[in-house]
Amino acid sequence: MKALVIDTETTGLDAPEVVEVAWVWVGIDGMLVAPGGKVSRFLPSKPILLGAMATHHIMDEDLADCPPSASFRLPDGVVYLIGHNVDFDWTAIGKPDVKRIDTLAMARSLWPDADSHSLGAMLYLVDRDNARVALQREHSAWVDVVNCITLLQHIARRCGPFSNFEALWLLSEEMRVPTRFTFGKHKGMAMADVPADYKRWLMKQPDVDPYLMKALRGR
């Protein structure tokens, strides 16, 4: 079963549309299956927000001759989609029917005391000698895919060995259920220590992340 590491650059955080997508096939050891991979740019139906532009440095005028964002499709045969905060990329490409492996959630679970779990911060944690060079063009979709593969390799070495991607996905699913709050006034607090009345209030809110809901309910 095939697994793809993916990264997207988008119009912004609100209803994101892709402006750049990079992906690479990977094997269960986190190594490239084949040389190359693919990076493509797309024309969104709305302007790129300034905050997003300041992050990835892609401007609207760079995309005038690109195909529309809505035309992006994953290559055939993808079963597992891997990314750092993979749900954002999955949403931006239209929420295809695939299993998602999230290196961000796994990093938070494996290194809970790190002050940041961004892809760049994790590279400095697991590959300090090479991180500065590797991150020189951070937020290029292609560079972020390559760096995500590096992080994936370290995760696999720490948690593995894995015989197949299904086992890695199941571990990702377990690790996606947070043990600590990652936002709000209780950020950093162990889930077990968050006041019960706050948990009950949060569970009644619309659109609560399903993994957070599992944690609020006691996994």
Image (cartoon, rainbow, N blue to C red):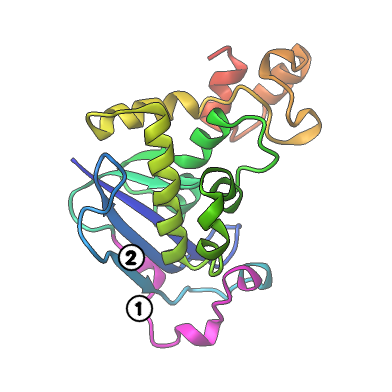
Q: Which residue is mark 1?
A: 67
Q: Looking at the figure, which quarter contains the N terminus?
A: top left
Marker disc for residue 115: none
Q: Residue flagged by tag 1: what amino acid is it?
A: Pro
Residue plotted at (66% across, 43% down): 116
Residue plotted at (73% across, 21% down): 201
**Helix, strand or loop under label 1:** loop
Residue plotted at (54% across, 82% down): 60
Residue plotted at (81% across, 31% down): 185
Could you say where residue 183 lies in the image, as x and y percent from the top left? 72, 36
Q: Of 94 and 188, which appears nearest the observer?
A: 188
Badge 2: how crowded within 10 Å, few (<14), some, or many (20+)? Answer: some
Q: Which residue is mark 2?
A: 72
Q: Are marks 1 and 2 in contact (CB under 8 Å)?
A: yes
**Rounded to the nearest whole Å, what is the CA distance between mark 1 and mark 2?**
8 Å
**Helix, strand or loop under label 2:** loop
Q: Which residues are magenta?
A: 53-73
